[in-house]
Amino acid sequence: MSASTEIRTLTPPDIVGRKNGTPIVCLTAYTTPMARLVDRHCDVVLVGDSVGMVLHGLPSTLGVTLDMMILHGKAVRRGVERALIVVDMPFGSYEEGPEQAFRNAARIMAETGCAAVKLEGGKTMAETIRFLTGRGIPAMAHVGLTPQSVNVFGGYKVQGRGHDADRILQDAVAVAEAGAFSVVLEKVAEPLARRIAKKIGIPTIGIGASAACDGQILVVDDMLGMFSAFRPKFVKRYAELGDRMDAAIAAYADDVRERRFPGPDHVFGDVPKAVKGGTAA
Ligand code: KIV
């Protein structure tokens, strides 16, 4: 490969540089083939802990382990050349304090080759974010609806309405001041998300938030119509691949039952004429 065709991988400072600039395009990926597709079009690939629900059939993200994140992080790393890879820190791997967070984030980075981690929480995580970034670990923050706290919220509810707005605003300010290189705003009421995007100096990445955010993220299986356990309002379906996959599998099953598959093109050696016509048993 000549120097001119070399692909430069995006870094956390590149993402910071996009504040108030061209919108940052982000999607999740958990496997090598999906990562290859996403990398062609996106700036950030998030190995989200949503993998637990999307690929492993878990009822929430709470059962996701560090080993699962590392396994999927490695798979994604093999498919990405240009995008910044961010790996989610799973529930229980960082909340005890900065040292625990550093130990587990360092393991994620060393074993997957990702360039940054994401952790949920605002003010309460500010000290941890400061500790990580001061020791070589770029951190993406995540405020608003933080799915690992679903039991505290009592469901996946919109955050930041009425008096609650101040709390979320302070969370966003706190993680920005602590050194996060960007922050995900999830399911935050639009006027508040817009206000936060204007107020803080780091890129805001919206999911069910506002078009005024500096970037957007969706779970790739949601926007492709491959995951239907939930259908949140904020997901725009760009394809209905789940339906198409269902139809393809049904067609295969019919072909096998009717002995139409495998046909002469799918086997090795000459097939007797009577069989080609489908009449021989
Ligand atoms: O786990 C995930 O996929 C996420 C995104 C929804 C932001 O955290």
Image (cartoon, helix red, strand yellow):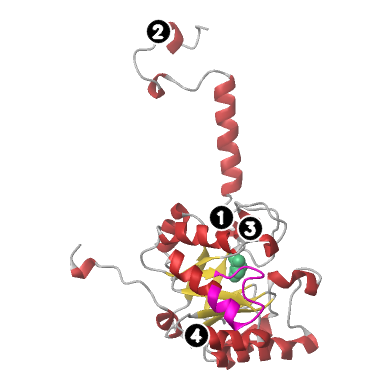
Q: Quadrant of ligand 1?
A: bottom right
Which residue is identified by label 2? 273
Rendered position, 68 above or below 147: above
Please, what secondary structure does the residue beneath circle 4 have? Answer: helix
**Type of amino acid under label 2:** Lys
**Type of amino acid under label 4:** Thr
Give the number of the mark in front: 2 or 3: 3
Q: Where is residue 271, by image quadrant?
A: top left
Give the number of the mark in front: 1 or 4: 4
> Residue 122 magenta-drawn?
no
Which residue is identified by label 3? 52
> Residue 95 magenta-drawn?
yes
Labels 2 & 4 near each other (Cβ < 8 A): no
Which residue is identified by label 4? 133
Q: Where is residue 270, by image quadrant?
A: top left
Labels 1 & 4 near each other (Cβ < 8 A): no
Q: Which mark is residue 33?
A: none
Please, what secondary structure does the residue beneath circle 2 have? Answer: helix
Labels 3 & 1 near each other (Cβ < 8 A): no
Which residue is identified by label 1? 224
**Type of amino acid under label 1:** Leu
186 and 71: which one is in front? Answer: 71
Mark 1 or 4, nearer chain start:
4
User: Which residues fall within the magenta stretch?
Assistant: 88-103
